[in-house]
Structure formats: C-alpha cells, structure tokens
Image (cartoon, rainbow, N blue to C red):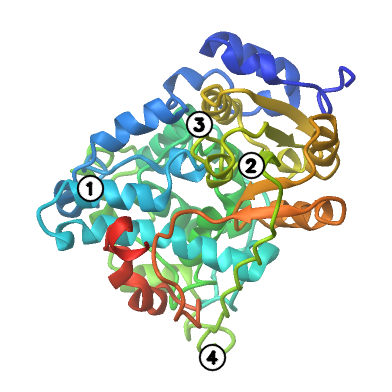
Amino acid sequence: MDNNPATQVLTPLAGLPRDELAAALAAAFPLTATGPGRGSRDAAARGGRRAALERLAAIDPVAYERTRNHVSGAVTRLSPWIRHGVLGLAEVRDAALARVDRPEQAAKLVSELGWRDYWRQVQSAVGDAIHADIESPAATSNIPQLDRMPDDVLEARTGMACIDAFVRRLSDTGWLHNHERMWLASWLVHARGVRWQTGADWFLEHLLDGDPASNHLSWQWVAGTFSAKPYIFNRENLESFTSGEHCRTCPVLGRCELEGSYEGLDRRFFVAGGAAVPRPPLRIRPRQPAASTPVTARPLVWLTLDSAAATSPAAAAFPESPRLFVVDDAWFVAERPSLKRLVFLFECLAEISGVEIVAGDPRTVVPARAAALNCDAIAVAETSCPRVRAAVTAIGTELPVRVVPWPAFCDRSRVTDLGRFSRYWQQVSRSAVMPTHTAHT
C-alpha cells in the first residue's frame, strides 16, 4: 500500500503510548485533528476492554435509579465502550442484575439500555432516514432556522454559564451527562433556532460515544420530529438537577431566556396552535434479521465501529481467524470524528491480539485482505449502521458473509411497531430484565 492516508496500514500505531498515538493520528488524519478539542485527549476516557471492565465493576443500579437525573448522580458512563462494542448491552444488563437483590432494583438502568437498543432497531428499520425529520414537527418554531453552528457557541462564549460549561466539557472530554445533552440540544434548537441536524452533526464530531442512531434520534426527540412534543426546559429544571451550580454566578441571571414557566416558554419558542400538519400515529415496522450464511472455519473477521473488541461476536465465533479493522473513508466524511475519538478507538483496537488496521474503503479493502490472507469468507458482527450494511451487501457479491448476532438483550419476536419507545418497551421489557442464561438460552 502507498503512503496516502486513505490507504495506509495503521497497525503499528495501536501500541503507542497515548501522547505518541495522538501525534501519529494527527499526522495521519490532519483534517480531523484540526477540529476543536485537538489538545484535549488527556481529559477523555481511555479506550479498551480493561478500562471498560473497571467502569462496569463500579456501577450501582440502586444509586443509579435514585440519582441518575442529577448531573453528579451515579450514572454508569459506559456509553463510549457500549458504542464501540467493547461492552454489549446484554453484558451490562447481566452485570447490573448481579449487583442487586431483586431484578426490579436494576429495572431503571436496564430501561435506559433499552433506549439504546430501541434507537438501533429504528435505525435498522429506516436506515439513513434518521438524518431527516421522521415526522412533521410537533410544534412550529417562532425562530428563524440556522444551518450552521453559531460562533459564540463553538467558542463557548454565549454568556450563559450552563451552556458554555457544557460546550467546554463536550470539547474537552467527549462526554456529557444525558441531562446536559438534552439541555444543550433543546436550547440550540428552540432558543437559538439551530436545525437539529446541524446540532446532531456537531455532537458527533466530539462525542466518544458518537452513534448516529442514539445521537440523531435523540436530537429528533428533543426537536419534536420523533416525539409527541418538543422537549424544553427552564431555569428551575436546570437548577434542580445541577444544585444551582451554573445559575448562581451566571452573567445573565435574572434575564435568561430560559427563565419562566413552561407555558411562557412555549409561547416564546413556538407558534400558537401546535403542529403545522396533523400527525397520525407513527408506525415503523422492524427490519427482519439478516439470514445466516454458512461460512468456512477460517473467515476473515471484519471488526467495525460497532465491534472494536476481541469480544465482538464475530471474533468470538472464529477465535483463530485473522482480524481486520478498516478506518472507513466515508466515516470521516459523514461524522468528522475528533482526535480524542480516534485515540479512544485505537486504544480499543490495541487490546485486540493480531488485529490489522487499514484505512480505506471496506468494500475494496476487506475482500483484498481476505484474498491475501487465504480467507474465502467474511464474518462481521450484526450492526444497524447503513454504511456497514451496504458494504456487506457489496462484499457479498464476491465472498460469503456471515453476520453474527450479539447476545440477545431482549426478545423482539413480537415487536411489530417501532413508532414509539413506550410501545416497544411494553413488548420487550419483561425479557430485558432477565439475565442472559435464564432468558435467552
């Protein structure tokens, strides 16, 4: 392969110390590395299975249920490892159940995992349609819409102590508490008029757990294009769940645009009369799982962003097979991942014995490496990512492809409608709070 970053072999980078790794990745991917947060990698979580298991061992489902809504609450912070397939949803659920006396004590934590499972099922069903309004807006904005992020937001100089703190933390660490994400998204969409797609794309650039399914569909939930009503908050709500941390010394205290009742904020942000177009109940049919394809005993295991670990079901199914991770060119175009995200990813890959890491187009790289390694088939973990699915279809014209499912998080066999999480969870919640060895063997 040549020295073009789009086709170069990156395997030697995976074993470098963090600072050297960051410098090497910045050199290999200069456009990505110039984004905000370039020098903030040291504040970000460390990638890899060892770090994930340390975090998993510290979860407290009972404290989580009691305190999760507060920004200093006992949240798990497992999302970066879940997003990259270093931890599976069923694995986290099983760990939570093992730490309680009764399953119902872990039910709230499991239900939050259920949201991530739900978003993935919706993405599986609608594909790239998650990037457009799934429904007509539930309310019509009073504010002109912006197609770019305002400079004062990007530079954390809005003058609002809460917003500027959220922006700095997002850039510095790649992680925000779920309430902080909702507040920041709501303020951007409803108070500043930023199109939800613009804000969602900005989040993807920085989040270590940047997952288009969870991210974009959550922004749609806030915007009211995949929910019964838009999500808004006021100063009282913010103060309640931050212990007033930001408001006490905020320069705009007393004249903040988020002060007042929810009724007042509705009048401020939205045209009277609600939705511009009547909305019938949404129905989304789940996508049927891909048919299993028989393969030889030694396929090439293709690891993706959803399965960047030796515990990937494809790697686990074929432990003696060669392993390949392709840094997809199209991923950079679509998500513009930050340097800290790349560092986290490569730290995950560094713990996978014998993995080969190549940058390029998987549709050409994967078959070529399979041929070079004398593999006559491909194994890949099940994913909701449309880009990977399209590549699987293309590769399947040349080689057999086995899509290996993850351990089941819940029983979806009776799910017929993904239009709302409440309807989905009603169908799967009972099985989701049962440990894997009991419910899914």
Mark 2 and 1 residues: CB-CB less than 8 Å, in contact?
no
Please state the horizontal and vertical placement of residue 162, each as a whole percent of the image. 36, 41
How far is the residue under mark 3 from the one under mark 1?
21 Å
Image disc number at residue 70: 1
Identify the residue under disc 2. Answer: 304
Q: Nearer the viewer, residue 307 or 374?
A: 374
Q: Secondary structure at mark 4?
A: loop
Q: What amino acid is found at the position of numbered circle 1 in the picture?
A: His
Find residue 122 and name its label. Answer: none
Locate residue 407, reporting x and y percent: 44, 55
> Badges 4 and 1: C-beta atoms under 8 Å apart?
no
Vertical relation: 291 (above or below) 304: below
Q: Residues within 10 Å of mark 2 (few under 14, many from 20)?
A: many
Labels in figure, total? 4
Is residue 399 or residue 85 the one in the foreground?
399
Image height check: is 29 above or below 335?
A: above
Dot 3 or dot 1, earlier in sequence = 1
Q: In the image, what residue type sits under mark 3? A: Ser
Q: Nearer the viewer, mark 4 or mark 3?
A: 4
Q: CA distance from mark 2 to mark 1?
A: 34 Å
Residue 24 as seen in the image, left or right of residue 231: right
Can you name the residue that lies furthest to the front here?
A: 297
Q: Which mark is residue 171?
A: 3
Q: For mark 4, does the 10 Å Cα neighbourhood hold few (<14), some (14 to 19), or many (20 or more) residues?
A: few
Q: Residue at x 57, y 27 (%)?
A: 349
Q: Which quadrant holds residue 159?
A: top left
Q: Which residue is mark 4?
A: 280
Which is more N-terminal, label 1 or label 2?
A: 1
